[in-house]
Amino acid sequence: MVIIIMGVTASGKSTIAKALSEKINIPYYDADQYHSQENILKMSEGIPLTDEDRKGWLENLSVEIAKWQQNEGAILACSALKKSYRQKLQSKSELPIQWIYLRVPQEIIQERIEARKNHFMNKSLVSSQFAILEPPENGYTVDGTNSTEKIIEEITNKIKS
């Protein structure tokens, strides 16, 4: 099983993915670790990534996802903001990916990102992320403003059913 915790920057993807990984004993990965140095530099300078910028990143992740499905599975923290990105991530997989969308209002995201330390994502990119966000039609939407414990409980209940 591969579960992708998705949403805009600062929605809590990494925190929730790590906690879920520990809870259900499936390895955790962070999609940010697969970005090229060029992409990281652009984002740190407040330049939104284009679909072309994301192309290699999504391709590499789709290969990894297929490998993870053949092995012990994975919990991946990944923005996956557009439907086309999710389709690319799913493209090499034989099994469906479980999508968990952390929905958080833009004003709360802005507060969270301003409080963040040592992260490459520039706060000016928040509005561009919301501009391209296409919430998933298949998968689960979870209120990302709840406590980590409540979110994990909700996710585990949904994936069990």
Image (cartoon, helix red, strand yellow):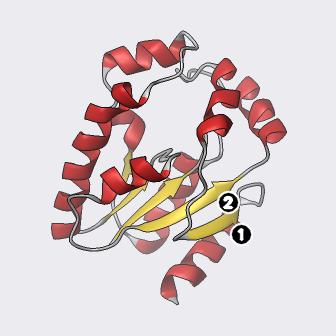
Describe residue 63's horizontal placement relative to residue 17 as left or right. left
Under mark 1, the amino acid is: Lys
Q: Which residue is mark 2?
A: 148
Q: Residue at x 61, y 44 (%)?
A: 133
Q: Could you tell me if residue 59 is visible in this image?
A: yes
Q: Is residue 46 above or below residue 64?
A: above
Q: Residue 34 appears at what percent x and percent y?
A: 31, 35
Q: Secondary structure at mark 2?
A: helix
Quarter-wise, where is residue 146 in the image?
Answer: bottom right
Residue 13 screen position, x and y as percent: 56, 49
- Residue located 74% across and 50% down the image: 104
Q: In the visual, does 12 lie left or right of 20?
A: right
The kind of residue tagged 2 is Thr
Marks 1 and 2 close (CB-CB < 8 Å)? yes
Q: x, y (%) of residue 158?
A: 57, 81
Residue 35 vs residue 120: left or right? Answer: left
Q: Is residue 87 above or below residue 35?
A: below
Mark 1 lies on a secondary structure that is helix
Crowd band around label 2 with a 10 angstrom C-alpha radius: few (<14), some (14–19), many (20+): some
**Quick one: 84 or 65, which is closer to the camera?**
84
Q: How many numbered circles does the render carry?
A: 2
**Distance from the alpha carbon under mark 1 to that under mark 2:** 6 Å
- Residue at (67, 38) in percent of width and height: 130
User: Could one spot residue 71 in this view of the protein?
Assistant: no
Quadrant placement of the N terminus: bottom left
Relative to 91, residue 114 above or below: above
Q: Residue at x 41, y 54 (%)?
A: 86
Residue position marked by numbered label 1 in the rendering: 150
